[in-house]
Image (tube, grey):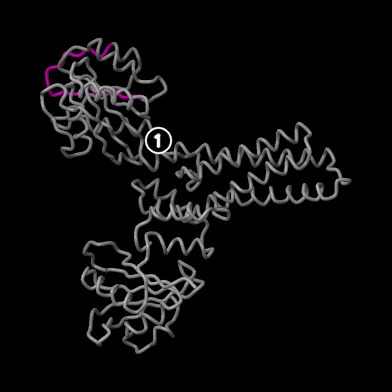
């Protein structure tokens, strides 16, 4: 029998309302000893999903808080177990004392993610839905929140379920053929199976293809800010963020390491990387910074090349722009537009590069730069919300399943024995099971729920 657990579900800061969640077989009995409804109802007899007003009292009968309480009985609760929630005033002192009272009644403090882990283990949600819980908590854009909310409803699990069921039907027939070797699968039926496997592989790969977009949605679009020393890269970073994150001086080489911050730009989360100025230098530390700049260029999904409007375009400027991979979207931000202009943009215009004139000092043109970033990464419309894979574990399971189905299709085409085909399909089934959590190792489950906050 799992023990009863409890946690403060509203964090450690002072709030208007503080929620304590209790889940387990003794939840109703324990709370009944502590909370006395105004209408004299016993919590053990309380209506399901009904809010009760009452007094929270200590073991010696002293009043701790006047608050609310709700009961959620198994199996119709978040965890699938008897669950009680106390809605107290948000004093950390009151919440801490209430939690200590619960512990004195034999309740254990919940571990991070333990409520959701119990929901998964009790069949209230599959693993993709459980992972969507932490994704929606951590979502930094509305698009990411919408995608996670749809996955919480089971979008991914439902999408792969019919694939799983289709593969089970094929496996059942192949097992019959292996058990009764005289019963061959005719060519017509074999073609049907080949078509079904091909359709399933294509659907899995379509889902898998969304992972790169999902990674950017969740972690942010890696955006390197590059340029010669002293063009104002750090100033542009500060102007985009709206506060002074990077130290700015007129001394070339001030920035010697990459500085990283996240910024929400419209529907996009931008992972800004302010880099060291690219120039020849004898300074070992600065040279390491330049190497990191070049590395950031290679990994970036967007590059903002910062030029100095007050000096002519140099060969060094163009050399930096040429270092940006052709496939990487790029924007040229011509900084210091508040000064007398000396930079001729003709060479940049020939290359059809998006150009934004900005002044990090006055803020002029920063909105145009943000608009251009959004143009480079419009909100995805071709993928239904909830069908964007943001999770590396899920992507690996999808890739494993798709590869196994490809191997099975090849085996059918090569007319190998049914047991070889069967092995590949069973591997695909196992991989889909890993995706949804129907086949999963305990250490993997533990690692997943360690990401959660206490109380969820």
Instruction: Say which element carries label 1.
Output: loop
Percent coordinates x, y for residue 225 in the rendering: 27, 27
Q: Is 190 located above or below residue 83 in the figure? A: above
Q: How many marks?
A: 1
Q: Residue at x 75, y 43 (%)?
A: 419
Determine which quarter of the picture holds residue 96.
Answer: bottom left
| Magenta residues (range) | 330-346
Q: Residues within 10 Å of mark 1 (few under 14, many from 20)?
A: few
Q: Is residue 342 magenta?
A: yes
Q: 105 or 235: which is nearer to us?
A: 105
Q: Quadrant of residue 352?
A: top left
Is residue 163 positioned above or below 317 on the image?
below
Q: Residue at x 35, y 41 (%)?
A: 267
Q: Residue at x 75, y 51 (%)?
A: 172
| Residue depicted at x 72% and y 44% | 422
Q: Residue furthest bottom?
A: 40
Instruction: Give the x, y percent position of residue 1.
Output: 49, 73
Q: Quadrant of the C terminus?
A: bottom left
The residue lying toward the viewer, choosing from 449 and 149, is: 449
Residue 244 position by quadrant? top left
From what the image shows, is residue 274 above or below residue 120? above
Residue 243 on the magenta span = no
Q: Position of residue 25 (x, y in %)?
A: 46, 76
- Circle 1 sits on which residue? 378
Q: Is residue 11 left or right of residue 362?
A: right
């Amino acid at each position: 029998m799992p023990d009863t657990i409890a946690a403060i579900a509203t964090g450690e800061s002072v709030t208007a309302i503080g929620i304590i969640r209790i889940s387990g077989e003794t939840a109703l009995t324990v709370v009944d000893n502590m909370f006395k409804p105004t209408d004299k109802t016993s919590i053990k007899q309380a209506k399901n999903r009904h809010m009760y007003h009452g007094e929270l009292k200590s073991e010696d009968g002293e009043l701790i808080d006047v608050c609310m309480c709700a009961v959620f009985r198994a199996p119709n609760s978040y965890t699938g177990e008897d669950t009680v929630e106390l809605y107290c005033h948000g004093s950390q002192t009151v919440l801490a004392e209430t939690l200590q009272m619960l512990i004195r009644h034999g309740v254990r403090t919940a571990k991070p993610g333990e409520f959701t882990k119990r929901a998964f283990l009790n069949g209230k949600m599959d693993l993709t839905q459980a992972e969507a819980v932490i994704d929606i908590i951590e979502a930094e854009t509305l698009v990411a929140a919408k995608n996670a909310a749809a996955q919480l409803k089971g979008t991914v699990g439902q999408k792969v379920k019919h694939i799983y069921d289709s593969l089970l039907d094929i496996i059942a027939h192949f097992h019959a053929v292996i058990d009764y070797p005289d019963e061959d699968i005719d060519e017509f039926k074999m073609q049907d199976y080949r078509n079904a496997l091909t359709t399933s592989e294509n659907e899995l790969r379509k889902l898998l293809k969304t992972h790169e977009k999902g990674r950017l949605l969740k972690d942010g679009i890696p955006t390197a800010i590059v340029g010669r020393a002293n063009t104002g890269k750090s100033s542009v970073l500060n102007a985009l963020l709206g506060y002074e994150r990077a130290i700015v001086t007129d001394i070339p080489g001030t920035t010697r390491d990459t500085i990283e911050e996240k910024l929400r730009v419209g529907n996009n989360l931008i992972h800004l990387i302010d880099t060291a100025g690219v120039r020849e230098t004898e300074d070992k530390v600065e040279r390491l910074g330049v190497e990191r700049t070049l590395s950031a260029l290679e990994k970036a999904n967007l590059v903002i090349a910062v030029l100095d409007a007050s000096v002519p375009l140099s060969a060094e400027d163009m050399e930096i722009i040429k270092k940006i991979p052709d496939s990487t979207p790029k924007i040229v931000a011509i900084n210091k537009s508040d000064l007398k202009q000396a930079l001729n943009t003709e060479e940049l215009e020939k290359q059809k590069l998006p150009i934004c004139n900005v002044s990090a000092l006055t803020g002029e043109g920063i909105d145009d730069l943000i608009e251009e970033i959004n143009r480079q990464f419009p909100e995805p419309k071709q993928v239904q919300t909830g069908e964007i894979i943001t999770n590396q574990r899920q992507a690996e399971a999808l890739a494993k399943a798709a590869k196994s189905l490809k191997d099975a299709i090849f085996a059918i085409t090569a007319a190998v024995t049914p047991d070889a085909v069967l092995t590949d399909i069973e591997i695909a089934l196992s991989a889909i099971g890993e995706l949804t959590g129907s086949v999963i190792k305990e250490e993997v489950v533990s690692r997943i729920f360690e990401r959660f906050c206490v109380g969820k």
